[in-house]
Image (cartoon, rainbow, N blue to C red):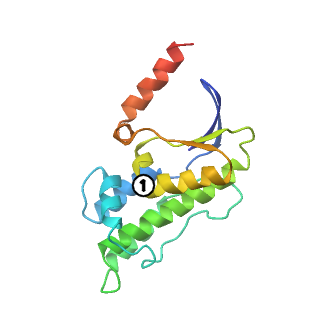
Amino acid sequence: QLLLVEGVGRYRRLATTIDDALGEAFDKTAKLLGLGYPGGPAVERLAATGDARKVPLPRPLLGSSEPHFSFAGLKSAVLRAREAMNDTYDEADIAASFQQAAVDCVIDRTRRALDHAHGATALVVAGGVAANAALRGALERLAGEHGLRFSAPPLPLCTDNAAMIAWVGVERLAL
């Protein structure tokens, strides 16, 4: 989801997923490709050796007026690509194409949400997908295009939602 943080404990939701979360889509793609769990790092490693232009995958909601996310159709398209795999592309091409489609969707949806985030001073990414280098880099470029500071947790903390939740608790107790 995309939130405008107006202060500690004060958030305005700008967008959410209408079906599956991005991390879930990475995990499902990893499973379909026979990779391990958690799926994000495995897909990212495999994607580094593939061609992101090889497998024609959809970009759900790309260009729509609402900033919400949808990844169920992308997951289904990965399943169909895996079932139809032949000499044209391989698992690495599917992983790279999936990752690029996901990044394209996140950037498009975030760009749309930023149109409604008046007063924003930074673009912050969190959660497990914040560890994905392609996504991090694209979000950092987007922040720069909008004159925003970019912030992301250190990589070791991206895989531990408990640490992020605990930090929120520390901030709330400090009030």
The one nearer the camera, 149 or 30, is: 149
Of the 4 image quadrants, the one containing the C terminus is top right
The amino acid type, in three-letter code, at marker 1 is Ala
Q: Position of residue 75 (x, y in %)?
A: 43, 63
Q: Residue at x 29, y 59 (%)?
A: 31
Q: In percent of the image, x 39 and y 75: which residue is there?
A: 51
Q: Is residue 35 left or right of residue 16?
A: left
Q: Nearer the viewer, residue 1 or 140?
A: 140
Total numbered labels placed on residues in the image: 1
**Quarter of the image where the N terminus is located:** top right
Q: How crowded is mark 1: few (under 14 residues within 10 Å), some or many (20 or more)?
A: few
Among the 4 quarters of the image, the one containing residue 14:
top right
The residue at 62%/55% (across/down) is: 109
- Compared across the picture, whether 155 is left or right of 172 comes to left
**Where is 88 relative to 126, above or below?**
below
Position in image of residue 120 (x %, y %): 69, 39
Q: Where is residue 2 in the image (x, y as percent from the top left)?
A: 59, 44
Q: Is residue 110 something that shows in the picture?
A: no
Residue labelled with disc 1: 133
Taking the image as drawn, is residue 95 in sight? Answer: yes
Q: Is residue 119 left or right of residue 157?
A: right
Q: In this view, does 64 lie above or below 89?
A: above
Is 148 on the left-hand or right-hand side of 132?
right
Query: Does 130 sit above or below residue 168?
Result: below
> Up-down: is 165 above or below 146?
above
* Disc 1, SS: helix
